[in-house]
Amino acid sequence: MNYEGLTLPKHLTIIMDGNGRWATERGLTRSEGHLEGSKTLEKIALYAYEKGIKILSVFAFSTENFKRSKEEVGYLMDLFVNMLNKRHYVFKEKDVKVIFSGRRELLRKDVLAAMDKITNDTANNKSGILNICLNYSGQDEIVDATKNISRDILAGKIKIEDIDRHLFHQYLYQDLPDIDFVIRTSGENRISNFMLWQMAYAELYFPKIYFPAFTTADFDEAILEFNRRNRRFGGNETKSN
Ligand code: IPE
Ligand code: IPE
Ligand code: MG
């Protein structure tokens, strides 16, 4: 699709949901669903950057996902290591900087090593940002920011009076602009503890498509939907995106 004249979200996020149901409906294992989802992520991310998206955050694994079976969690962690190690040249070539949001504790050493390697290898890339949320919880991000702010107050680096939205933002995991548009696939109408602070004025979109089945045409439709939204940010003038 031709994107001429369309407004793009500056910060786009995708909650990649529905891998398991996609697989089950096809008589496949949940793992096969996750593998297909990882291929979809690469395809959609590269398409998004090609169309001019600069910042993409994706929800890959929530802190709550540790509640799943040992087998499924293990498979997902293996998949992350594989993806990050084997496919990372793709993001290097496309000049995309890969960063992560989430807590490092509870993640396996090989996962952390793969995360650190891709972070270092893509640190100077300028064309786009891929923020992978892994062992991520939106509430924990706010808790962690609050702890670090408290530490800096006790250390005398800042004063309570200094705390405002702008300062709080500086203590989040990554320095990214607020989210403009959230795509959550699979038909669930919830945000499942994703980037709560950053989502304050985001437009939400819930296509009834399992993530592995999400195509570039579905992405085009999402961008058209974003362009149909009338964002007011609490004001009353009609403002286009
Ligand atoms: C999203 O797909 C991937 C992760 C949460 C890791 P799901 O695994 O949640 O798939 P469904 O929701 O069970 O279909
Ligand atoms: C949200 O999906 C997390 C990711 C996509 C990584 P879930 O499948 O974990 O969300 P719930 O449990 O349906 O809310
Ligand atoms: Mg799910």
Image: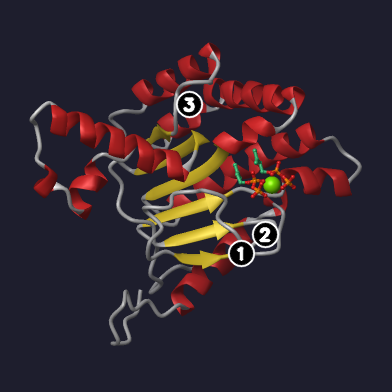
Could you say where residue 68 lies in the image, as x and y percent from the top left?
Answer: 71, 32
Q: Is residue 59 left or right of residue 10?
A: right
Question: Where does the N terminus fall, quadrant-wise?
Answer: bottom right
Q: Which residue is mark 3?
A: 89
Q: Marks 2 and 3: CB-CB under 8 Å?
A: no
Amino acid bearing label 3: Tyr
**Helix, strand or loop status at disc 2:** loop
**Earlier sequence position, callout 2 versus callout 1:** 2
- Which of the pair 228/145 is nearer the observer? 145
Q: Quadrant of residue 145?
A: top left
Determine the CA span between mark 3 and mark 1. Answer: 31 Å
Q: Marks 2 and 1: CB-CB under 8 Å?
A: yes
Q: Residue at x 22, y 34 (%)?
A: 150
Res. 149 in view: yes
Mark number for residue 92? Answer: none
* As drawn, 71 above or below 160: above
* As drawn, 61 above or below 235: above
Amino acid bearing label 1: Phe
Mark 2 Cβ inside 8 Å of ligand 2: yes
Q: Which residue is mark 2?
A: 188
Q: Is residue 105 left or right of residue 69?
A: left
**Helix, strand or loop status at disc 1:** loop
Q: Furthest residue to the bottom?
A: 237
Could you say where residue 52 lies in the image, as x and y percent from the top left?
Answer: 39, 56
- Which of the pair 62/1 is nearer the observer? 62
Q: Residues within 10 Å of mark 1 (few under 14, many from 20)?
A: some
Determine the CA span between mark 2 and mark 1. Answer: 7 Å
Mark 3 Cβ inside 8 Å of ligand 1: no
Q: Quadrant of residue 209?
A: bottom right
Q: Which residue is mark 1?
A: 206
Question: Where does the C terminus fall, quadrant-wise?
Answer: bottom left
**Helix, strand or loop status at disc 3:** helix
